[in-house]
Amino acid sequence: MKPFYITTAIDYVNGSPHLGHAYEKVLADVIARFHRQLGEPVYFLTGVDEHGQKVQQSAKLRGIPPQQYADEVSLEFRALLPQLNISNDDFIRTTEERHKRVVRQLLQQLFNKGEIYKAEYQGFYSTRQEQFLQEKDRQPDGAWPEIFGEVTEITESNYFFKLKGYQDWLVEFLTKNEDFIFPRYRQKQVLEFLKDPLNDLCISRPRERLEWGIPLPFDENYVTYVWFDALVNYYSAVAATGQWPADCHVIGKDILLPPHAVYWPIMLHALGLPLPKSLLVHGWWSVNGVKMSKSTGNFIVPADYTAEFGVDALRYFLIREMNVGQDSDFTRVQFLVRYNSELANNLGNLVNRTLNMTTRFGGGIVPAAGPAAEAEQELHALWNKTRDEVIPLCEGFQFHTALEKTFAFITATNAYIEKRAPWKLGKSTAEADQVLLRTSLATMAEALRLGVALLQAVMPATTEKINAVLGYTPGAIWRDELVWGSKLAGSKVAEALVLFPRPQPAEKVPAKP
Ligand code: MSP
């Protein structure tokens, strides 16, 4: 069975990783883990984009060779993965031989097919974006937008890929495959973009202008344009093992158009290779409304949060806070609000009450449940509803809502405990109260086990810890774990588990927003 093949964008190594990069990895990781949970084999690729002008410039600034610079910064991106508990199967660097070989092979194939030609080109060039600009890129006042940095007019001979000839094919493909890009409105944007005629794509840079790249196999005086090099990573990583096509490319909205929505499908089609099954396009994290980025310097360092609050608190926040596809602002206050009210006071509280009460009133062993009365039946019904809603939500990338519903179930379980008040039942010797006490202990433990099963993809380490203190080893088939039952009856639980220690009082914010 071909694995579910999922990729992230490969990050430029011209600066250290920030929270935007971290988010994309976590999002892809949650999807990868979700598919593994459903019993599918998964192949998860991430990596770094090491060639191009930006890296060459950054290396020059540091006064070291680009390879050395790329080696150093790549290590930082690689180190981010275990820090975030990312379950990738592979990590590709575009300076690796396995990648360069495939890029050159594909270029040669396209050249042999007559899809690449040489021509003289004159135009306005943005060094920052490494692209020639078009008249339509100008602002109404004629100036070039800030994002292009310094723009100069240059003439040079270059190689071009015949993009133009594939425009009608691409429009037809996107019209027929409405779900190629998520969210759907992005696909509409691409079709809008394709209403204007495409130009052929300049795919080379003369080596005198850019040394740091993969030389064209048919003309060593040129290196490949960065996008042609970068996009191929998705294919080069698995070219030898046959996992292509990708099922899902997870990317940010800034790199959808034109690279992923236009260049990449056309490159593959021209090569006679299958297209990826889907593009998942996420939004941007900002700080005070400004996109978080290396160049503006307004970035959050993920390690600051994982060190202070633990990896799962950050993973939870990123996935709970952002509606996939839209933008979100990152603030420490909002992080603390969720940390306190959802993780510490809700989930952490349920774990501690369950352990504490099972220890005090059950001798540390989860009892068998007695007959379910109304309060238990309500919780069972809520569980069934929650589970049946959460799975399709995850399949549709609505992870923020899936978490909201899962936490509503955890809230309901805490409310159930308040209602049953085992601490009162424990004081009574009446048989009916003792039965109810055992039922309430069994019910809270089972509800916790179930709720936690839905959190597994987002908070894998926390889930593991909670299962361990419940004395529970989940079975191999995740869906079978989601049935309300008595899997914990007879389990020996631990006395306590500190999952989400409270932040310092000085930083405390109200528990509810
Ligand atoms: N190297 C290219 C991608 C090549 S993929 C074949 C690139 N690199 S990048 O480092 O600039 O960005 C990598 C990914 O991080 C992109 O998907 C980008 O959208 C994402 N993010 C960078 N800043 C971001 C935020 N502030 N918020 C969320 N994600 C953003 O582009």
Image (cartoon, rainbow, N blue to C red):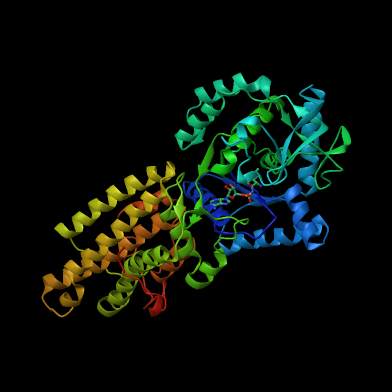
Tell me what residue is drawn at x 13 percent, y 72 percent: 433
Tell whether 122 sits left or right of 274.
Answer: right
Q: Quadrant of the C terminus?
A: bottom left
Q: Is residue 239 above or below residue 78?
A: above
**Residue 311: image x %, image y %?**
51, 65
Give whichever of 154, 465 is nearer the camera.
Answer: 154
Give whichever of 448, 200 is nearer the camera.
Answer: 200
Q: How many marks?
A: 0
Tell me what residue is drawn at x 61 percent, y 31 percent: 136
**Residue 281: image x %, image y %?**
52, 42
**Residue 488: image x %, image y %?**
34, 64
The answer to whether residue 181 is visible is yes
Q: Is residue 162 above or below residue 369?
A: above
Give whichever of 328, 491 is nearer the camera.
Answer: 328
Q: Quadrant of the N terminus?
A: top right
**Residue 132: image x %, image y %?**
71, 36
